[in-house]
Each structure stands twice: as C-alpha cells, then as structure tokens.
Amino acid sequence: MLCIGIAFLFWLFTKLSYVYRSSISIRVEYAIAKDKVLTVPAPDHLEIDVEASGWDLLFLFFSSKKYQIDVDLSDNMPKNVNSLTIKAKIIKQLPDNVNILEIRPDLIQFSPESIERKEVPIVLDNRLELSNQYTLKDSIILEPQTVIISGPTSIIREIKSWKTAPLLIPNLESNFKQKLGLKAHENKNVVFSPTKVTVIGKVEQVTEKSIEIDIIRRGVADSVLLVLLPKKVTISCIVGLSDFDLLSAEQFTAVADFSKINVYEQSEIRIELEEFPDYVKQINIQPKSVVYIIRSRAKADR
C-alpha cells in the first residue's frame, strides 16, 4: 500500500506538471469613483478559457481572489471595454505561466451616473391569512416607516415608495412582531438603508353585533309629509371583542335621500349608510329599502 501511495503521488505530480486547456470562472470587481454608480451592473464573474499547467489550474479553481478591472469614468461618458482590454488587465494578475485564450463576455458596457439618495415610505406587502373569527385590532405598524434608497439617479428619481417582502403568516390568531426584509431591486446597484423593518400587529377575536337605528329623512319639501314604514333599520356588523361594548347607534347614520328620486313615481326608497366606525367590518343593513306614504302637510295639520 505504501508503494502504491508513493507511485500515485509521483503520477499526480507528473500529471499536474502537464499543460492543459480549461474553462474557469473568475470573480471580478471594478475600480469606479465613489461618487459614481453604473446604470446597468457589470458582470461580477467572467468565463475565461486558459492554457496552463495542472498546478496553476488547480490554484485558479480553488482561488477566491477577486480580479480588479480599472475603468476611467471621470468624464461621465459611457464606455465599452472589449476583450483585449479586459485580457490585458486580467493577465497581469494571473500566474506567469497562465495564458488566456478567450474571455466571455467579450464586451462590457459601462454607463456611469451620479449617485442619488432619497427617503421614501415603506409599503407593506400584506398577505396575512387570519383564522376564522379573528381580525386585526389596529393598523399594522412598521418600524421604521421610511427607507433611504441610493443608486443611479435615473432609477432613484422614479421611485415614490418601496414594498416589503411578502408578509406571510397562515392561520393567524395572536399578536405578532417580526423582522421583514425589503423587496429586492432588479438592479443590484440600488441599495437600501435599513434593509429590514420590524412589523408589529395586534390580533383579536371578533363577534357579530346588531343595532337598531332611526332613519334620517333628507331632501323632503316642507309641503310634503312622508311617513316611512318602517322608521328604523337594523345594522349588523362584525366587531372586535375589545370594541363590542363601545359600539352604539350614535356611531351610525342611515339616510333616506328623497332628493335623488321622484317621490310621486315611486313607493319605496333605498337606505344609504353614510357614517359608521372604521373598526367594524361586513356591515349589513336590513331592510335595504323602505316603503313611504305621502301625505299633504296641510291635511296632516288639520
């Protein structure tokens, strides 16, 4: 076994001394002025066909080195860097015996822009799935409520707000507080600060409540006396348990607006709900329409 091991090592050293052709991927970075950014990100990896010894190929394969490409963008003009220029910049950073045969892509376009920063509101991508008989007690809180976005001027100026990643919580039945990332921009040169927000929400159980309220008549001429049948409607709605006792008839306004119809051609009118608390849901009004009787106010007075 020892002899076999020694023979294998001699064979391996011999093989790695031969020259081979291979394709490898290298990481690159670009030396660009700090006050500039690229409109379209340049590739962060290049595919190169090389001719080198097995030792050099092994080094390149396992290397985590980033190869630097210097680009002069001081005049703010777009530039195209071809494969010959890229090769000249890369080969200086490779071992002496490595020969570059081909580089892909063979052309890199650089479009410099000034960096712009802007503070915009964060919009929650809310995809919560509340369990039956549960609701959000208050509006969901975001901390912070704004984000600073920086990147190419032409892109940043078009951004008015920015979304979070989807907030996905199935069968939610309790209060929650969690960190949530922001939606990534398709241009990696657009960066965010901060990159995450804290999302806080309060959840409570709900129940149904019914309230009877008077109908308010509107748009009735002084010479006409209208009698509604019935004079009240019943409001049913879904409300959180914490607000159940606070909900009262005074918070609702049901209106029969006679200015919208010809009172002599119709015999009933639709009831409109004009005011109601913002914390109630699934509001239902019964009846939705009521019958009315027209009487002369002069006869009624006699």
Image (cartoon, rainbow, N blue to C red):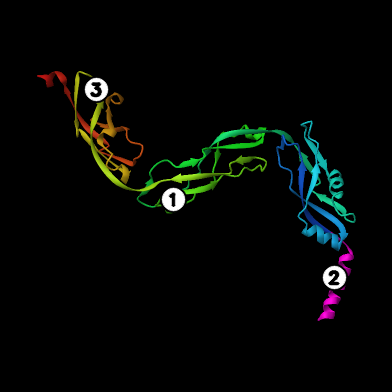
Q: Pick the residue in front: 76 or 179.
A: 179
Numbered disc in front, either 2 or 3: 2
Residue 129 is tagged as: 1
Q: How many C-alpha atoms fall within 10 Å of the one at disc 3: few (<14), some, or many (≥20)?
A: some
Q: Pick the residue in front: 95 or 107.
A: 95
In which quadrant of the rendered image does the N terminus lie? bottom right
Circle 3: residue type: Val
Earlier-in-chain disc, 2 versus 3: 2
The image quarter containing residue 33 is top right
Q: Main secondary structure of the magenta part?
A: helix
Residue 220 is tagged as: 3
Circle 2: residue type: Leu
Q: Verify whether residue 275 appears in magenta.
A: no
The residue segment tinted magenta is: 1-21
Residue 248 appears in the rendering: yes
Q: Residue, x 77% and y 59% (percent of image)? A: 62
Q: Residue, x 65% and y 35% (percent of image)? A: 155
Which x, y percent locates residue 228?
A: 20, 30
Circle 1: residue type: Glu
Which x, y percent locates residue 236?
A: 28, 42
Mark 2–mark 1 distance (CA, rounded to whole Å): 60 Å
Which x, y percent locates residue 50?
A: 85, 56
Is residue 112 found left or right of 230 in the rendered image?
Answer: right
Extreme residue toward the left, this view: 302
- Give the labeled residue for mark 2: 12
Answer whether labels 3 and 1 touch (C-beta < 8 Å): no
Numbered disc in front, either 2 or 1: 2
Which x, y percent locates residue 94?
A: 85, 52
In which quadrant of the rendered image does the C terminus lie? top left
Mark 2–mark 3 distance (CA, rounded to whole Å): 104 Å
Answer whether labels 2 and 3 touch (C-beta < 8 Å): no
